[in-house]
Image (cartoon, helix red, strand yellow):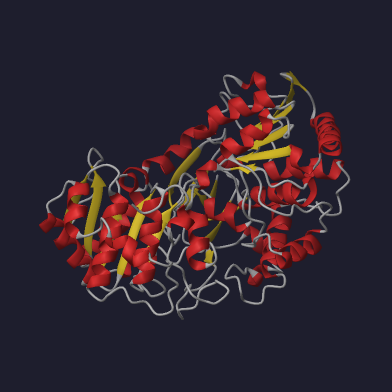
Amino acid sequence: MAIVRSQCGQCALGCGIRVLTGEDRDLRIEGDPTHPANGGLLCARGRALELGEGLDGRLLHPLVQGRRQGWERVIAQLARRLSAIRARHGPGSIALHVGGGLLTEDYYVANKLMKGFFGSAHIHAPWLGDVGRLQRAAYGEDVMPGTLEDVGRAGTILLLGGQISRDHPVLIDRVQAARADGARLIHVATAGEQLGPEADLHLSIAAGSMARLIGGLLLHCRDAGVAKAAGLVVPDGYWDDLRRGHDIWSVARACAVPPATIRGFYETWVAEGRAVTLAAGADRATAAAILNLHLATARIGRPGTAPFLIGGGANGMGAREVGCMADGLAAHMGFDAGALDRTARFWGARDLVRGAGLEGEALLRAMRDGEVKALWSIGPDEAASDWLREARALVPLSIRATDRGEPDAGGWTFQLPSAAWIEKDGTLTGMDRLISRQRRLLDLPGEARPDWWMLTKVAQAMGWGDAFHYEWAADIYREHVRLTAYRNDGARLLNLKRHAPISNPAYAELTPWRWGEVPFDEGRFATPDGRPRLLGPGDQTDAAIP
């Protein structure tokens, strides 16, 4: 019997768990009272991890065209076929799909192999959503500006939508605790959504009107003299455009709510300088409106003030930190010349990608046109099952790394047995920049292996062993940390240099820690001129604020 502190990993909150491990893969799980994210609280999804120890339905051995083969032969075949495709069709002929249930070390190796050695940025990760893109556009860097502790420091908490109540009950417990301490809670949900926790004000609005409601609040703040943040970069004509259709009466009609109720909500929010907004699964227009509201009213960069856009996946922040997406490089760097030079030197890259790749439907079109010949898919992603089914049928080489056998898995060229969540070992980053250790609770069954291990072995077999020398997850973490600090002159907040010399024993005992201190507390942002930017229609493409 042993007690292990690890991570729940069922959502972006990053809750810690305390696990009693026994014989025959037996687990007893409870919330970790010492973890900052949840302080001992745990929802039903976290407790259900106890049910994941069984081996029924597990993929336990590598399969090639449905037939079992040993790892040595599989790695050799993968290296040979990927090398041939890359040599014949070029670096853009290989694509990657990543699910949301991976650790930072898995994402790091996958991103490095794709962008630095395959020379491709074609990475499909639909669960990441638009949070990172919008925060980069507004702040200059993909940084969550607040922490979960800010919920308890807020005077007013604005809870948008019913998804948080359904998917993040531990966060709702924190909200209710803040309300008990005197915070005012306003909950806005669209008609038909669950009303959620007890609140001081409930608004049920028409479907599709959330962005209009928040845009109207920003206009009200402007007229009340509250929206006057210093140094804010505002798109030309923004305020005039916002005024059309965002007065209280127009908003009331769009939301199907009496004007007096809208006015009461707006005046309540304006009166409190310490305001936190929580939203999960918000569409792009609503998410942009939330960021604009907090930036314009300077409700950011101070205790108890922050917009929280909760993304998908257990480790979405970790995936974005290492750049495992189509439109970023690594360590919060873009594709500018300086970033390309730094990354190429640090990685010893053989063929560093020069710009953003394809994802979604655009990537499928490239497969249909014969431009993409190979797809490697790692990690669980139920929402992408239809996309994966079509994609694997379009490419000659399809590779699926997963912990479970899938009913229609016969269409994959290679099936690789990966670790289930409770068998993973590494780190992840919660939604508020809190890095925590995921510790293996059970031994890997059969021939299951971590995703970073598979990627590393293939890279080594392709002749890149000098750049992929990892034996332990700690080796990858150290490299990731050093890349964030490499030639970082302070322009990027993501800088994990305090852990650059971390030893294997210290990594094993790593306790939760948060990077970034208090972002933007001095009013300076990560943009070239240090000024934040309101998001206009150009930052939202097809989903501009109405």
x, y percentage for residue 39?
39, 59
Question: Does 448 sit left or right of 129 as displayed?
Answer: right
x, y percentage for residue 339?
71, 65
- Quarter of the image where the N terminus is located: top right
Query: To which quarter of the image does residue 157 belong?
Result: bottom left
Question: In this orientation, which residue lies closer to the viewer: 146 or 227?
Answer: 227
- Asked whether the viewer can see residue 404, the reply is no
Question: In this orientation, which residue lies closer to the viewer: 230 or 399?
Answer: 230
- The residue depicted at 22 percent of the width and 57 percent of the height is 186
Above or below, 146 relative to 97: below
- The residue depicted at 43 percent of the width and 67 percent of the height is 235
x, y percentage for residue 515?
55, 68
Question: Does 185 sit left or right of 289 as displayed?
Answer: left
Above or below, 214 relative to 221: above
x, y percentage for residue 182?
20, 67
Above or below, 318 relative to 237: above
- The residue depicted at 28 percent of the width and 62 percent of the height is 243
- Asked whether the viewer can see residue 476, the reply is yes
Query: To which quarter of the image does residue 534 belong?
Result: bottom left
Please, which residue is most extreme toward the right here?
463
Query: To which quarter of the image does residue 86 belong?
Result: top right
Question: Does 130 sit left or right of 358 as displayed?
Answer: left
